Amino acid sequence: MTMIKETYPVKAGDMTAAGDVSARIKRQMKQLGIPASVVRRVSVGTYEAEINLVIHSEGGRIDFSISPEKITIRVVDQGPGIPDLKKAMTEGWSTATNEVRNMGFGAGMGLPNMKRNADEFTIESTVGVGTDITMSFNI
Amino acid sequence: MQVSEFVKLAGGRVLTGEYEDREIACGYTCDLLSHVMGKGQADMAWITVQAHMNVIAVAALLDFACVIIPENLPVDETIIAKAAQEDIIMISCEQTAFELVNVLHEGGVPSAKKG
Ligand SMILES: Nc1ncnc2c1ncn2[C@@H]1O[C@H](COP(=O)(O)OP(=O)(O)OP(=O)(O)O)[C@@H](O)[C@H]1O
Ligand SMILES: [Mg+2]
């Protein structure tokens, strides 16, 4: 049984709005009384994914769903895709521009943070098509 | 240590105005947002030279006790307004991050956990 299923679009390049979707998802989790430790892990995973959509992708969406057992976050974008997933998943590896590095992004920790905080993490990416990430978190 | 105690000891200025006092559970200083996302815990005091919207987003998302800006670095009014709206206590201090860590440490605040 799925209690909630929502989709939020995320625009590429919009640094001021970056984080808004994560904030909305967090509010919903709190309203539903999800335990604080789960809220925290989902928030970290969602925020990292949202920032990546803004700074690395051509735009995409975040799907949020809750069942009694788990929370699932799916993140799909419209490109450009990641050529080497193994490299991308390595701590410290980043192609972030100087502009976003000056803002404190580009540590190359976002994808590792997502993987560490989720109970299940899958990532698929095709150059020229896009990236598709699913994270699930046991409640 | 309460946020108000830190403000007093550090001679800080609370940019966001009146606030509800809260306990500081731990502290961390870093300017790379993903490192902070990885280490961040509820009720953490975060010292950073970054002062933009995304800092407020991170602090709000992880329920930090306060954001501390060292060396009187300029903070835009729009950032302060956003912080106030999100109930984030934003404090500006004259000292360096190094000195501010010492204030927290002497007050018995532990470091955010590793890993
Ligand atoms: N949605 C995406 N589309 C295209 N490339 C991506 C996407 N997400 C990540 N990448 C690539 O993977 C690299 C590593 O991503 P990761 O989130 O781990 O680090 P970062 O975003 O560079 O820095 P940080 O997240 O620490 O601020 C990125 O630098 C980028 O090259
Ligand atoms: Mg990232």
Image: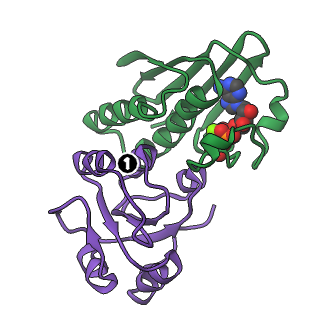
Chain colours: A green, B purple
Residue A2 visible to an observer of this rendering:
no
Q: Quadrant of the N terminus of chain A?
A: top left
Residue, disc 1 = A36
Secondary structure beneath dot 1 equals: helix
Please state the quadrant of the image where ligand 1 appears.
Answer: top right
Residue at left offset 41%, top offset 24%: A66
Q: Chain of mark 1?
A: A
- Looking at the image, the residue that sits furthest to the bottom is B106
Where is residue B64? Give x, y as percent: 37, 58
Where is residue A86? Give x, y as percent: 84, 34
**Residue A112, picture quadrant:** top right
Residue at left offset 47%, top offset 30%: A70
Q: Quadrant of the C terminus of chain A?
A: top left
The type of residue carrying mark 1 is Ala
Numbered marks: total: 1
Where is residue A126? Give x, y as percent: 78, 15
Taking B114 as reference, is A121 above or below it?
above
Of residues A77 and A114, which is closer to you in this image? A77
Mark 1 C-beta to ligand 1 under 8 Å: no
Of residues A22 and B101, which is closer to you in this image? B101
Residue at left offset 24%, top offset 52%: B87
Residue A19 visible to an observer of this rendering:
yes
